[in-house]
Amino acid sequence: MPSVSPAAVRHALPQEWSQIESMVRLGFGDDEPFLRAYFDHIWQKYPTLVSTQDDQPAAMTILLPCRILPQDKEAAYVYALTTHPDHRGRGHAQALLQAAHQRCRRLFLHAASPSLHVFYSRLGWKDCLWTRKTVLPAEQGPVPQEIPVEQAMELRTRLLYDTPRLDWPLPLQHFFGEQIGKNSACYSDGSCLITVMDARHGTLYVSELLGPDAVKSAQGLACTLGCSQLQYLSPCAPEAPDAYPHFQYFGAAFPEQAAWQYDLN
């Protein structure tokens, strides 16, 4: 049991924002452009919870509002959960998660490492998306064209119309879209969508493939970009070879893992 009670969790106070900003920088080590976008689009705009030690912030998280489509159910995503290095190991993270669940029945998060996945699982979180890495050779074939991020987001919504996923308010969509525009490129032929993260050492790294012919088009794109192979993560059943739990929930039951589409854009 944690030594910190959920009663020690409260909303952040305006005079504590400098402490919280410092905690974010210590906890995640993101580069300055991402932090600037985070502070501009998210920071102070959504419910920020702090777990306190002597009434001072010791840990924090932000609850991002979202909806589960197509069921249209309210949910929240636990984002930027971190504990100040001086206060780790005292149960602050668990207290924050318990307090978050008191505020929202359906919670989601992404375990950024195997050790964190074990931590969340011990607290009763369940896996709802399993993924596996797929590597395919590049092949000559139809090559989609690069498209603007705004167009890609509209196409993505259409391609995911009947797929269970998380949907975000417009300000958060703009934030995620801005990050996609900075760190990746989007390609489409109108029927598929390919989001490219990087091309290095002969490999084209793709974060998402949508559409019936997306894999074939991505192989053609890899060939055109001078890569010998394509690598991407795709949703799969938990019993699939090399399956890894990528996304977790706490709350009501959700669709089968193989049907779940990870949607943070």
Image (tube, rainbow, N blue to C red):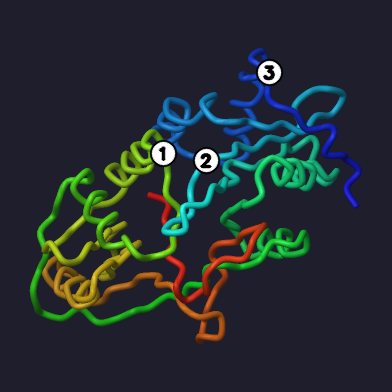
Secondary element at image label 1: loop
Q: Which tag is nearer the camera, tag 2 or tag 3?
A: 2
Give the labeled residue for mark 3.
13
Please rate how many residues cluster around mark 3, counting C-alpha atoms within 10 Å: few if below 14, some from 14 to 19, many from 20: few
Give the labeled residue for mark 2.
65
Query: How far apart are labels 1 and 2 at the CA level?
Result: 7 Å
- The x and y percentages for residue 15 are 66, 13
- The x and y percentages for residue 118 are 71, 65
- The x and y percentages for residue 114 are 64, 65
Which residue: 29% across, 67% down?
Answer: 209
Per the rendering, the mark at residue 169 is: 1
Q: Earlier in the sequence, mark 2 or mark 3?
A: 3
- The x and y percentages for residue 49 are 68, 32
Per the rendering, the mark at residue 45 is: none
Q: Is residue 118 left or right of residue 258?
A: right
Query: Against 53, is 3 above or below?
Result: below
Q: Earlier in the sequence, mark 1 or mark 2?
A: 2
Which residue: 47% across, 58% down?
Answer: 71
